[in-house]
Amino acid sequence: MAPTMTSRPSPLRARRLLRGERLADVARALRVHVTLISLIERGERSFTLCMLNRFAAYYRTPPERLQAEMDRWRTAVGLDEPGRAEPRPTPGDSAA
């Protein structure tokens, strides 16, 4: 079940918004595409160890805390198992 627009924002998105930053600001700072930041914030992609460490350094938060916050959020909004994001089907995909 995907989070709805009324769902609470992910901890990463909340941190970004509290700092008054745009996705592009974080993407530029982390040297990755804005789409990757968006997917991770929405819980549609999991952290790689490298990305977790980049986010942790950027937000000056221990990586374990960020991972735990995202895992709790993913569970609360009904996404896949904590720490794991499966690719979401796109329109036109069929179950084979």
Image (spheres, helix red, strand yellow):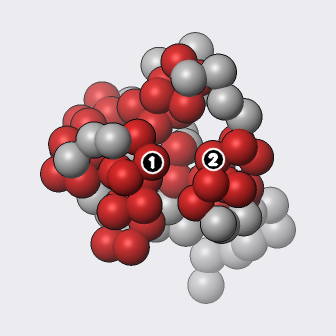
Residue 78 in the image, given as x and y percentages of width and height: 37, 37
Q: Is residue 7 visible in the rendered structure shown here? A: no
Observer-nearest of 29 and 40: 29
Q: Which residue is mark 2?
A: 26
Observer-nearest of 8 and 16: 16
Distance Cα–Cα, label 1 vs label 2: 8 Å
Q: Residue reaching furthest right?
A: 92
Confirm or deny contact between disc 1 and disc 2 (CB under 8 A): yes
Q: Secondary structure at mark 1?
A: helix
Could you tell me which residue is drawn at 80 percent across and 61 percent down?
Answer: 91
Disc 1: CA contacts within 10 A as few (<14), some (14-19) or many (>=20): few
- In what quadrant of the picture does the C terminus appear? bottom right
Please report whichever mark, 1 or 2, sits nearer to the chain's N-terminal start: 2
Could you tell me which residue is drawn at 72 percent across and 64 percent down?
Answer: 33
Q: Residue reaching furthest bottom?
A: 96
Q: Is residue 20 visible in the rendered structure shown here? A: yes
Residue 40 in the image, given as x and y percentages of width and height: 52, 53
Disc 2: CA contacts within 10 A as few (<14), some (14-19) or many (>=20): some
Would you say 55 lies left or right of 95 here?
left
Q: Is residue 73 above or below residue 14?
A: below
Q: Secondary structure at mark 2?
A: helix
Residue 1 in the image, given as x and y percentages of width and height: 48, 41
Q: Amino acid type of disc 2? A: Val
Q: Which mark is residue 58?
A: 1
Which quadrant of the figure has residue 47?
bottom left
Observer-nearest of 85 and 70: 70
Could you tell me which residue is drawn at 47 percent across and 28 percent down?
Answer: 15
Q: Amino acid type of disc 1? A: Tyr
Could you tell me which residue is drawn at 40 percent across and 40 percent down?
Answer: 59
